[in-house]
Image (cartoon, rainbow, N blue to C red):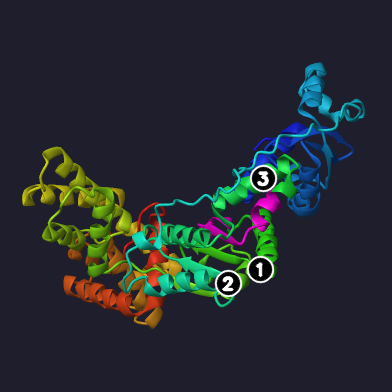
Amino acid sequence: MSDRIQSPAEVWQTAQGELQLQLPRETYDTWLRNARLLAHEDGTFIIGVHNIYAREWLEHRLKKVILRTLSRIAQRTVEVRFVVASENGHRARAKREKDEEDVYQAGPLLAEIEKSRPETPRFERLAPGETGLNPRQTFHTFAVGSCNNLAVAAAQEIVQAPATRFNPLYIYSDVGMGKTHLLHAIGNAFRECGRRVLYVSSETFINDMVGAIRGKSTGEFRSKYREVDVLLVDDVQFLAGKDSSQEEFYHTFNALHNANAQIVVAANAPPDAIPGLDSRLRSRFEGGLVVELQPPDFLTRVDIVELKARLRAPNVSLPLDLLERLAGEVEGSVRELEGALNRVIAMTLVNHEAPSTGEVEAVLAEVQAAARSSGELAIEDIMMAVADYYDVSVDSLCGRDRSREVSTARQVAMYIAHKKADLPLQQVGEALGGRNHSTVLYSCERIEDLLMTDTQVRRQVAAIMRTLRPQMTVGL
């Protein structure tokens, strides 16, 4: 390791690299990516930022972590000061510098700091009356079954009596179970009643907030989100870990709630299972009604394919036994089911007749092959994910520990390896301590039974699957 003393510019560059790893990506990109070292004087790093909002945020929210990082890299106690500096002033100064070491001379630099120019607001502006809703996703096009009837009943109740019993309404499920469709159905029903409705994803909310801050348009941003009767926010789990976005959403939530506006949010997990979610938001979400959309059963899947077939190909008649075959074979998400149905409809339109049994078999084989290729999992990865989730060691999973916690973790690992990764019983048993195939089969059957009756186990398995394959649909 070199003993060469780093220049202030090198220290700042190294610090930025470390801060990028320490902070949530949205926080770093918004407040630090474009920050630059203007000068260094007597141990004080003078950092230029584009506007007063960035300066205030860094001063009050991130200064401690920046100081700690700079001091560790510089191997001495340092100070940091944030100033508003235009990009043009910085470039003009940079051209006059003879070399990087000129950064030590702070005096002339500070005279060139200019007021930042106002930026054009960059948050998404909706036209008057625009809601962000998909008009085709309504209650009439949503298949209802035992897997989702509670959520649908709650949704219809809030349309009849908004902001009374269930506010907020919190809907969660794995990917592809109909959360987004249900949000749009709620929004469209409210719109028919003449309510002011806004549907956004959490990503849109974050981008709007950042754009409003950069463009000094926070008033217009708040008008957009707070002057509505109904706010629907999808994928709210992506707010987790983003302190500034959660802070703003918290205040938006309170403003709407105090104004008796209805709030509906959707996520991939219940509030208490989202790591990094602000405790105040978790409390607000849990103070309403939290409902789960479960994977559709066979009868609901049949209803789904019948409904989708009528909507997507009203002039095509598909035999009921063919639709039942699709519903019986494709047990994943609604999206997978729709994908298989789309292939069958396309085949029918091309051939001008319903596909044969052999053609349907080919479609199902393609769908299943695609699912397997996108979801290949190594037994080692499964064991690590399960051990981390249950806070047990991999050795315990493979050993003879029969405590309840380890036994449950071991059985979940066997279930995921055999049922989700499609690994042979013998391979799974050998990896988990040389157990025979009948033990693995019993464990898989036990977990399958629990998934049907125990909501906690279902959540645990779903959480582990999201860890293993965040982009993969989890069908339990």
| Residue 474 on image: x %, y % | 35, 60
Circle 1 is placed at which residue position? Answer: 257
Quarter occupied by residue 172: bottom left
Q: Are marks 2 and 1 in contact (CB under 8 Å)?
A: yes
Quadrant where the N terminus sits is top right
| Residue 170 on image: x %, y % | 51, 68
Task: Tell me which numbered mark, 3 or 2, is placed earlier along the sequence.
Answer: 2
| Magenta span includes 237 | yes
Asked if residue 376 lies left or right of residue 159, the reply is left
Within 10 Å of the Cα at label 3, are there few (<14), some (14-19), or many (20+) other Cα atoms?
many
SS for tag 2? loop
Residue at 69% x, 49% y is 221
Within 10 Å of the Cα at label 2, are there few (<14), some (14-19), or many (20+) other Cα atoms?
many
In the image, the segment drawn in magenta is 221-239
Circle 2 is placed at which residue position? Answer: 167
Quadrant where the C terminus sits is bottom left
Circle 3 is placed at which residue position? Answer: 210
| Magenta span includes 82 | no
Asked if residue 262 lies left or right of residue 473, the reply is right
**Foreground tag (3 vs 2):** 2
Q: From mark 3 to mark 2, how far is it between C-alphas?
A: 27 Å
Task: Tell me which numbered mark, 1 or 3, is placed earlier along the sequence.
Answer: 3
Asked if residue 194 lies left or right of residue 357, the reply is right
Q: Which mark is residue 185?
A: none
Amino acid residing under circle 2: Asn
Amino acid residing under circle 3: Val
Frontmost residue, 151 versus 420? 151
